[in-house]
Image (cartoon, helix red, strand yellow):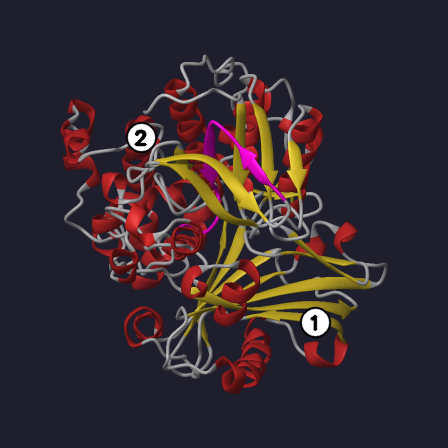
Amino acid sequence: MSKHRRTGRVIILGAGPGGLASAMLLAKAGLEVTILEKRSVVGGRTSTIEIDGFRFDTGPTFFLFPQVLREIFAATGHSLEKEVPMQRLDPQYRLVFGSNGGELSAKIDATADVERMKREIAAISPADAERLDAYFRDNREKLQRFTPILQTQFESWRDLLRPNILRMLPLVRPWRSLDSDLRRHFEDERIRLGFSFQSKYLGMSPFSCPSLFSILSFLEYEHGVFHPIGGCGAITQAMARVAESMGVRVLLNTPATGLIFEDRRAVGVHTANEDLRVDAVVINADFAQAMQQLIPNHLRRRWTDERIAKKRFSCSTFMLYLGIEGHYDNVKHHTIYLSSDYRQNLRDIEHDHQLTLDDPSFYVQNACVTDPTLAPDGMSTLYILVPVTHESSNVDWIQKEEKLRAIALKQIEKIGISGAEKRIRVERRLNPATWNSEFHLHLGATFSMAHSLRQMLHLRPHNRFEDLDGVYLVGGGTHPGSGLPVIFESARITSRLLLEDLELEPGWHPSPQIKGNAVYEVAP
C-alpha cells in the first residue's frame, strides 16, 4: 500500500448485512466508521417492507447457521439472542413435488429429527431413507473440513495449493455437479431435489452447481432453520442499532457519487453534499453496479466493464408481497413447490432466459403461523417468490408481470392457498427490472454472480480488492459468496484484512463460549 496520511476513518458503502457486520467489527477495533446508504432503510435485500401495518422480508426469509453472526455480536460485547429473539422451525419447511398429471406427486415435511425424516423419505423411496445417515456423515465431514477455507481469503491460484485444500479434493469432488454427487446417496430424483433445491440460494441449478454446496442442505438439518421475530429484517435493524451504539454513523438517503483517488489508492468518497477523506473504503453495494458507477473503467485492470459483461450472473426472482384478510393455518411457515418439469424450468431460467408459464416452481412464506406480529389483528402476510431469469431482452416485464402474477396466484392453490386474490388488502411486487432500478442489482440478479467453479475462491472479486489500494469488498459478490452465513463470514475476512493493512489489532475474536442452538425455542 502507498504511504498516506492516516485519518482513522473508514467509509462503508451500503448498509446490507455485510456492511453492517463490518461496521461493528471495525468500530470495535477503534476506527471511526461511517456507512453511506442510498436507500431510506438499512438492510439492503435483508430489509423490511412495511405497508399499512403489514411487514414483509424483502429478500431472505430463511436464517441459517446463526453461529457466525452470534460470534460477531459477542466479539463486540453484545448478544444476538437478546437483540433478536428467534424460533427454530420444526418442520423447517414443506417440500411439494408436482407431477405431469397436474396433481401433486409427493410432499415432505423436512425435519432435523432424523427418524421422522427417514419416515418422510420412506413414503416416497424406502431405499433412500436408509441412506440418509450416510449423507449426513459425508456432509458433516465436508462442512467441518471446509469451514476453515470459508474463513480465509483467496487472492491467487497459489492459494489453491494449500495442503488443507488439496486434501479436500477427494471429499469435495469438484468435478461433479451437486445432483450427480447426491446420486451416491439418493436414487429418487425428488429426494435429490429435496436436498439440492438450496442451490437456488446461490442462483444456480443443482445440475450445474458444484458438489461442494451439498453442505447448504446439511446446514439446515444440522444447525436448524430459524425465524427471527419480526422477520430477517429485524436482524439488520438490530445490527444497525448496535453499530450506532458503538459510534458508527449510518447516513440514509446518502448515495456515494464516486471515489476519490490519489494514483491508484482510494482516499475518500464523493457525495452530493461533501467529500469525505478516509483510510479505506469498504464496498457493500452490488459489485457489478458499484464498479461501473463509482470507479472509472481505466483504473480497473482485472474487473473492467468488458470483463464484468462476460461474467455469468445468477437468476432473479418475481416477488408478490401480499397482506391478506384472515389466515391460512393449513399452510406451513415455509413451503417450496418444485415444478413437475424441474429441469425445463431451470433451463428456462438459466439458459433460455424465458418465463416458465406452465407449472413454474415457487416458494411461499406464510410467516404469521409463527409470528403474528407481522400483520394487524385478523390479518396475515404471504410472501410469494417465483424464480425467473435475470433481465433479458427475451422478457418484457411491463407486458409479462400481470400474466405471471395470475399464474403465481393460481399455482399457490396447489399447496392449499385458495381464494387469496379476494382476500388481498395490500400488495407489492418486484421483478428483475425493479430489483435493478430500486435495489441497484446488476441485471436484477438477486444472488450476484453465479457460483460456478470459474467464479469461486480466487476467481471471485477479492475481499481486498485486487485492482486498487484502499478498497475492500464485502457481501455476496465477493468470497465466500451469497447467503447470510457466508456474507457475515466475508465481513470477518474483509475487516481482518483492512485492519492488517492499517497495522491495527482487531480487538475482537470469535467467542468459543457460545456454541450450539440450545437458547432457541422450537416452533411447531
On screen, residue 151 versus residue 483, left or right, reads left
Q: Secondary structure at mark 1?
A: strand
Numbered tag placed on residue 153 in the rendering: 2
Question: What is the span of residues highlighted in magenta in the rendered image?
Answer: 274-287
Give the distance between the C-alpha atoms of the residues marked 2 and 1, in whole angstroms.
42 Å
The secondary element bearing badge 2 is classed as loop
Residue 344: mark: none
Judge from the rendering whether residue 79 lies leftward or rightward of residue 170; answer left or right.
right
Identify which residue is drawn at 63% across, 63% down. 331
Q: Residue at x 45, y 52 (%)?
A: 286
Image quarter (top left, top right, bottom left or bottom right) of the N terminus: top left
Q: Is residue 125 visible?
A: no
Residue under pointer 1: 427
Please, is residue 499 above or below residue 421 in the view?
above
**Quick check: 237 above or below 289?**
above
Residue at coordinates 40% horizontally, 76% vertically from top-left? 99
Please tell me whether residue 278 belongs to the stretch shown in magenta. Answer: yes
Mark 1 Cα-neighbour bin, 10 Å: few <14, some 14–19, many ≥20: some
**Residue in the foreground of this view, choosing between 400 and 334:** 400
Q: Residue furthest right?
A: 377
Q: Quadrant of residue 246?
A: top right
Q: Is residue 4 left or right of residue 80?
A: left
Residue 24 appears left or right of 155? right
Please, which residue is most extreme toward the front here?
262
Is residue 449 in sight in this rendering?
yes
Q: Position of residue 399 (x, y in %)?
A: 51, 87
Q: Nearer the N terminus, badge 2 or badge 1?
A: 2
Q: Nearer the viewer, mark 2 or mark 1?
A: 2
